[in-house]
């Protein structure tokens, strides 16, 4: 089996001939075998399987596919090379070899943070990105199997909402802890000890050394990298998570339940981490300051890291705290998680900026630019107590659009402006929309999306210990992804109908539709009739490239 995975399929002569469905299945099988070996503590077998995966033709092709289809696919490194054509992608497979590999320096750029400071971002070359992705395939099963139970950042099947749901579970009860240690690590990615990484990360040391010691180029000068992992590397997030894993078991061991006067006494020290941001709960601020903090400091010092004193605070739940763009606070004993004020201000600042930048744009173009921004922010906060804030946001957007319309027509009256830009759609008045006529004479509208139209739902948090590379958790994770998809498409009746009719499967390949894979609605014309289907993005491209392909009927046994 391993020889077959490592060898180039005889039928593959170009990039278009690669069966990526088979590639994903082969990589997934090897990853599940690695995870099983880690659980059994067979580290020799882990190393052998990692070698097999990183030398597999399918894994190399899949790594190139990932780096050429993400958001940074048009961003080049120091060599100014971009893989856009199928020919260049296919030739790149031969470049992903261990023998003679030498990582090129990183291209250093800076992006602005919320506090006005600059965050260094290091951009690898396309070859280095593909190599990092390839070795991340082999490292990720190990990281997921050994990870802290309640860490959520940069992990598959886990997101911000999972971390927020964890906060709700820990803090919402009457007997829940009321003091919170808000932790922030100072320059986490830039200060991790290379010695600790080399001694503790279970992957090919030769390749790992190349990733860490590649250096970076800034203003035409080459600088060495003596510490840290590059922010921008595809494997950096996995390494960073593995560096920070291990604190939760230490806290559990130190704060075990104690038997006092015939009763179990719980310290209520609970740990939740998202990337380098974490919170630790406790019943007593003295315990958090004098016992928990020293443990955290010692844990980080071993890895070359330190706590940020200005951002590390001890807060009472009645005062509330901001975590991952949300405000967590108890009001009269009831825990409410709302969008943070900073998040609302940042969102409205972005909306107003778009409106100012499009003073002369058409109404249709302005709506097209605003809708994705509104939709993204609302979908992020739709699982929190956001109803009133959504109404406030809609009001602020309306005032900004009214000023936009008044400026364009300063010599017109208010009623004229209302008739031109605002319409009654269903039961809503004053809807900012572009009116147009259909071929059959009926009126259609291209309308602005309103935050208050979004239904507030409870997010299905992930179970403790769920591992996407463990065979025992596959059924649960598939059911959870289906439930998340139902929540996501709930506002669109057509998508919900198609998703349920197709039983959550792609109409072309028959595989599951998930949030990770995404989905596209494809209109297929059959004679005079037109049928809608939900398909994967890759399948959608195939349907347009090869019109001879036909989606399977939704009611067939295939689905």
Image (cartoon, grey):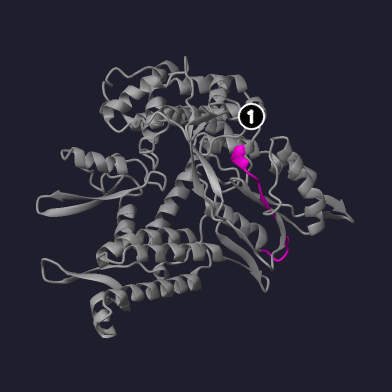
Name above or below for residue 68 compared with residue 500: above
Q: Nearer the viewer, residue 484 or 401?
A: 401
Q: Hey, which quadrant is residue 330 in on the image? A: bottom right
Task: Identify the residue at the far right of this view.
Answer: 261
Residue 36 visible in the displayed image: yes
For image coordinates 44% across by 53% down, the residue present is 483
For image coordinates 35% across by 75% down, the residue present is 403
For image coordinates 53% across by 26% down, the residue present is 214
Span of residues in magenta:
173-190
User: Residue 381: percent from the left, percent from the top?
Assistant: 49, 61
Q: Nearer the viewer, residue 224 or 301?
A: 224
Q: Is residue 238 left or right of residue 405?
A: right
Q: Is residue 247 left or right of residue 485?
A: right
Q: Quadrant of the C terminus?
A: top left
Q: How many marks?
A: 1
Name above or below for residue 105 compared with residue 365: above
For image coordinates 56% across by 43% down, the residue present is 466
Q: Which residue is mark 1?
A: 194
């Amino acid at each position: 089996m391993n020889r077959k995975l490592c060898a180039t399929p005889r039928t593959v002569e170009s990039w278009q001939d690669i069966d990526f469905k088979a590639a994903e299945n082969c990589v997934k099988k090897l990853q599940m075998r690695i995870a099983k070996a880690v659980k059994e503590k067979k580290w020799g077998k882990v190393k052998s399987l990692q070698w097999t995966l990183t030398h597999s033709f399918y894994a190399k092709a899949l790594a190139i596919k990932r780096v050429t289809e993400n958001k940074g696919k048009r961003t080049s490194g120091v060599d100014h090379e971009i893989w856009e054509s199928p020919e260049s992608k296919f030739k790149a497979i031969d470049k992903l070899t261990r023998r003679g590999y030498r990582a090129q320096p990183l291209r250093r750029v800076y992006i602005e943070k919320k506090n006005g400071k600059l965050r260094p971002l290091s951009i690898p070359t396309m070859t280095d990105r593909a190599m990092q992705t390839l070795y991340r395939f082999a490292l990720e099963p190990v990281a997921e199997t050994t990870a802290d139970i309640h860490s959520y950042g940069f992990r598959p099947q886990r997101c911000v909402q999972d971390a927020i749901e964890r906060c709700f579970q820990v803090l919402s009860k009457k007997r829940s802890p009321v003091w919170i240690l808000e932790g922030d690590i100072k320059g986490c990615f830039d200060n991790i000890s290379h010695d600790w990484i080399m001694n503790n990360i279970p992957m090919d040391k030769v390749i790992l050394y190349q990733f860490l010691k590649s250096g970076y180029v800034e203003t035409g000068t080459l600088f060495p990298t003596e510490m840290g992992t590059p922010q921008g590397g595809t494997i950096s997030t996995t390494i960073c998570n593995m560096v920070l894993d291990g604190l939760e078991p230490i806290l559990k061991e130190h704060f075990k339940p104690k038997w006092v006067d015939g009763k179990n006494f719980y310290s209520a020290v609970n740990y939740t981490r998202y990337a380098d941001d974490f919170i630790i709960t406790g019943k007593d601020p003295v315990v958090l300051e004098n016992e928990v903090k020293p443990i955290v400091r010692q844990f980080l010092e071993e890895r070359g890291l330190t706590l940020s004193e200005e951002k590390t605070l001890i807060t009472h739940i009645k005062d509330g705290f901001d975590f991952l763009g949300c405000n967590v606070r108890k009001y009269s004993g009831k825990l409410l998680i709302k969008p943070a004020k900073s998040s609302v201000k940042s969102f409205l600042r972005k909306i107003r900026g778009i409106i100012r930048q499009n003073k002369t744009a058409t109404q249709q173009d302005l709506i097209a630019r605003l809708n994705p921004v509104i939709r993204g922010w609302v979908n992020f906060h739709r699982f929190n107590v956001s109803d009133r804030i959504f109404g406030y946001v809609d009001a602020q957007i309306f005032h900004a659009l009214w000023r936009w319309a008044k400026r364009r027509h300063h010599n017109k009256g208010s009623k004229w402006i209302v008739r031109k830009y605002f319409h009654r759609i269903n039961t809503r008045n004053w809807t900012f929309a572009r009116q147009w006529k259909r071929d059959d004479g009926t009126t259609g509208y291209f309308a602005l999306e309103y935050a208050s139209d979004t239904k507030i739902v409870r997010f299905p948090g992930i179970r403790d210990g769920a591992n996407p590379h463990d065979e025992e958790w596959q059924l649960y994770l598939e059911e959870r992804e289906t439930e998340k998809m139902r929540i996501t498409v709930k506002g669109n009746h057509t998508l919900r109908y198609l998703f349920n009719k197709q039983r959550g499967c792609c109409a072309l390949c028959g595989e599951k539709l998930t949030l990770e894979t995404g989905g596209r609605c494809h209109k297929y014309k059959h004679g005079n009739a037109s049928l809608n289907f939900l398909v994967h993005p890759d399948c959608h491209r195939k349907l347009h490239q090869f019109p001879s392909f036909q989606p399977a009927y939704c009611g067939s046994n295939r689905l």
